[in-house]
Image: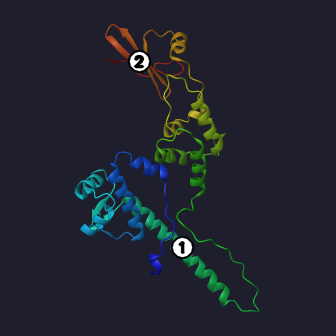
Amino acid sequence: MSEDRKMVFIKYWPDDVLNGCALLTWQSELTYRRIIDNIYTSDNNLFDDEITWQVLTSKFNGNVDQIKDELIKKKKIFISNGIIRNKGCDKWLAEAKLNNKTASDRGKKGANARWNSSSNAQAIPTTNYKPLSTNQISTKDKSFNEFWDIVRFKKGKEDAKKSFDKIDFNKVKYTNIELANKYNEQLDNLPEWQSPKHVQGWLTGKRWNDEESLTPTDFAKKYNIEGSFQKYDDGVYYFQEKDSFGLMTYKYKKSGELVTSGKKI
């Protein structure tokens, strides 16, 4: 195997894979997982031919045309120049190769420095670099992964990561761990009438600063709202009220302030 074909470590996110396969038939899911493994082991040269698809579906004799059509329509794979491709694999393979080359170059540079130094010369201090792999992640990624491991309502990891990366922890009084515990604390104290907030929206809205929400009955009583409670979403109470135009839906902030004009039903 050539130097370029020495494949290293590939990033793998179980949550993303499970969520991404949720709507696939079991035959297509098994085939898809085999495709991913074969893309990596073939260095992104998995041929789109009859033999390949027979091997991919050999365990259950699935309908190749249906499986292939489903995977393409659901954007799990695409065919390019006779090769079965996956956007995620393209990205992780490129990153793995770059990191592997960087590690190799650093190793060669360090070795050359040691071998070329004379025995009488003062030893040149060198940094001991460990080979890089795609499972080595940035400090920000590590911080998010620690946060994600703790939160208990795990929905929308990718979007949550984007929101997390925008947080300036120098200006937030919580650490990543404390923030995760704060989310779980609010989750534990969530009223029965209130749906759990996805982590992404919770982070974007800086919901760690939220005060405890009043029940719809207490909220209506406190702010003299007449009408029937509809829902609570993103810190806003929705009430259906009757006025001269008929039944209207009004939205209120936690402070009791009307945030929009009513919408006629």
- Residue on which the image places disc 1: 102
| Residue at position x 34%, y 60% in the image | 59
Residue 81 visible in this rendered orientation of the protein: no
Which mark is drawn over residue 140? none
Task: Give the farthest residue toward the front.
Answer: 60
Instruction: Establish if 149 lies above or below 194.
Output: below
Q: Quadrant of the N terminus?
A: bottom left
The answer to whether marks 2 and 1 mark residues whose Cβ atoms lie closer than 8 Å is no
Q: Is residue 183 left or right of residue 251?
A: right
Asked which secondary structure carries label 1, the reply is helix
Earlier in the chain: of badge 2 and badge 1, it is 1
Label 1: few (<14), some (14–19) or many (≥20) C-alpha neighbours in 10 Å: some
| Amino acid at pointer 1 | Thr
| Residue at position x 77%, y 92% in the image | 120
For the residues marked 2 and 1, what is the alpha-carbon distance in whole angstroms? 58 Å
Which mark is drawn over residue 250? 2
Residue 225 visible in this rendered orientation of the protein: yes
Q: Quadrant of the C terminus?
A: top left
| Amino acid at pointer 2 | Tyr
x, y (%) of residue 217? Answer: 51, 13
Protein image colouring: rainbow
x, y (%) of residue 186? Answer: 59, 31
Instruction: Establish if 237 lies above or below 43.
Output: above
Asked which secondary structure carries label 2, the reply is strand
Q: Nearer the viewer, mark 2 or mark 1?
A: 1
